[in-house]
Amino acid sequence: MNLAIIGATGNVGRKIIEVIEKSTLKVDNLFLIASEKSSGKILFFKKKKIIVEQLEKYDFSKADITIFATGGKIAEEWIPRASKKTIVIDNSSFFRMQKDVPLVVPEVNSETLNKHKNIISNPNCSTIQMVLALKPLHDEYSIKRVIVSTYQAVSGAGKASVDELFEQTKNYLEEKKITSKNFSKQIAFNLIPHIDVFGEDGYTKEELKMIKETKKILDDDIDLTATCVRVPVKTGHSESINIEFNNLYDLANIKRILNNAPGCKVLDEHKDGGYATPVEAEGKYTTYISRIRKDNSNNKAVNLWVVSDNLLKGAALNSVQIVECLIKKK
């Protein structure tokens, strides 16, 4: 198999290379593509040097499958052309809600890959880790409503945002002036309840992504509301989720279901440190579920805490798992 990565020099692009290296995928040729500014750089794949090629000069017919790790503008411009010559897996939000484009989390809805027309979308990072937990519970008890608050790491906004967190933290500790470049307010030692642009109804685009994507992936009848918050954490998104079912449930069974869910692990002890945080999740393929408890205000509802590496399962790992599914289906 020949594989290409567009946006290979970015945070997600580099993570995709790492994940492929650790996978059992048999890659005959790996093409690494980026902007004119990054072309000519040398990256390594299995100790072999690969020169980064320029997007504008690249021939998409070279690869069987191409992973786009770029923003929406690049995806909009280049994916329609690329998909005429290669199967595309897109990490941007541009194609996610198009009816004929599967929105795929392999552990949840890999069957939708059968309907692809050479474009497959990777969901939003926060959506991915949430639906991993929701899917088996929905199958067992039928979910009526979800209330989620996210606590999202700065790496979800790109390398420049990570650099700014470090710079602001240093300036704060040295009692120097803090200037915000990539955030609407100071991010160091602070929380920002604002990710992406605001809509007329007061929801941000990030919140609407979670709502719409969850409905497309799981069930359009599920009601969902979200509040997305940027936190001063480098890597690892966390979510506080309240799930209301249409049916009564057994808490012990909820824990069994979640611990057996593909890609998930329950880490839930009622003691100091008996739960997962972003520190434990960083660098791991697993999505951790903690703080599983009854909602004492509603006998059909349960509370969860879900943590995952946003650059891995939230992006790179999910993309590579889609590649693996495509190969198995051949």
Image: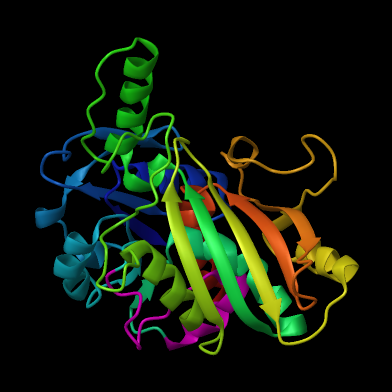
In screen coordinates, is 120 left or right of 292? left
**What is the magenta range?**
94-115
Residue 158: x percent and y percent?
32, 43
Q: Is residue 182 visible?
A: yes
Q: Is residue 129 left or right of residue 153?
A: right
Give percent across and percent down for residue 297: 75, 70
Q: Position of residue 113 (x, y in %)?
A: 48, 80
For the point 39% across and 69% down, the residue is 209
102 is within the stretch colored magenta: yes
Q: Where is residue 70, by image quadrant?
A: bottom left
Image coordinates of residue 148 in percent, x first then y, are 55, 64
Look at the image and tell me in which quarter the N terminus lies: bottom left
- From the viewer's perspective, is 141 left or right of 131? right
- Give the camera-side residue of 177 and 326: 177
Rendered view: 18 above or below 132: above
Residue that appears at 18% across and 60% down: 74
Task: Indicate whether residue 300 is drawn in magenta.
Answer: no
